[in-house]
Image (cartoon, rainbow, N blue to C red):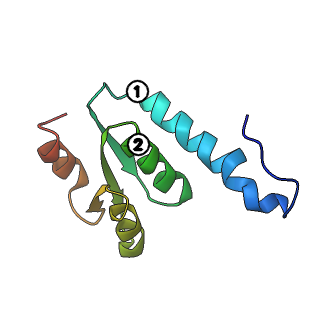
Amino acid sequence: PIKVPNTGEDERYLYLSDVVPTAWQAVQYAAPPQGGSLAVLGLGPIGQMSARIGRHLGYRVLAVDPVAERRAMAERHGIETLDSSGEVAEQLKDLTDGR
């Protein structure tokens, strides 16, 4: 469990009770091999956190989103990004040697 102070509004800790566990499970369900790569489609709150968790766990993370600001945010955390306006499947295959 994560202990938080009794001060402040509950909404302040929403990430700990919703976004972080959901993102963590997404990465666990993907089950990439050790040293493997992880594709994250969409960089909203869950996608951003999934990408960061994947990076934290040592995966090469390739994230796809049409919004430049979201891609830039992910890039600041060491995530490789792709604009979804292109041929995403082909780009991902090229970047991962066909996987």
Residue 56 is marked as 2
Which element carries disc 1, helix, strand or loop? loop
Quadrant housing the C terminus: top left
Q: Could you tell me which residue is drawn at 51 percent across and 61 percent down?
A: 44
Q: Earlier in the sequence, mark 1 or mark 2?
A: 1
Q: Position of residue 93 (x, y in %)?
A: 17, 42
- The tag on residue 68 is none
The image shows residue 72, relative to residue 23, as above or below, that is below
Q: Is residue 19 above or below residue 72?
A: above
Residue at 48% x, 29% y is 29
Left or right of residue 97, residue 16 in this image = right
Q: Which residue is mark 1?
A: 31
At which x and y percent is residue 12? 75, 62
Q: Please tell me whether residue 22 is drawn above or below residue 99 in the rendered image.
A: below
Q: Secondary structure at mark 2?
A: helix
Residue drawn at (51%, 37%) of the image? 26
- Nearest the viewer among 91 and 5 is 5
Q: How far, Cα to Cα, is label 1 from label 2?
A: 14 Å
Which of the 4 image quadrants contains residue 77?
A: bottom left
Circle 1 Cα neighbour tier, 10 Å, few/some/many (<14 / 14–19 / ≥20): few
Amino acid beneath label 2: His
Amino acid at dot 1: Ala
Q: Give the residue drawn at x 42%, y 68%.
A: 70
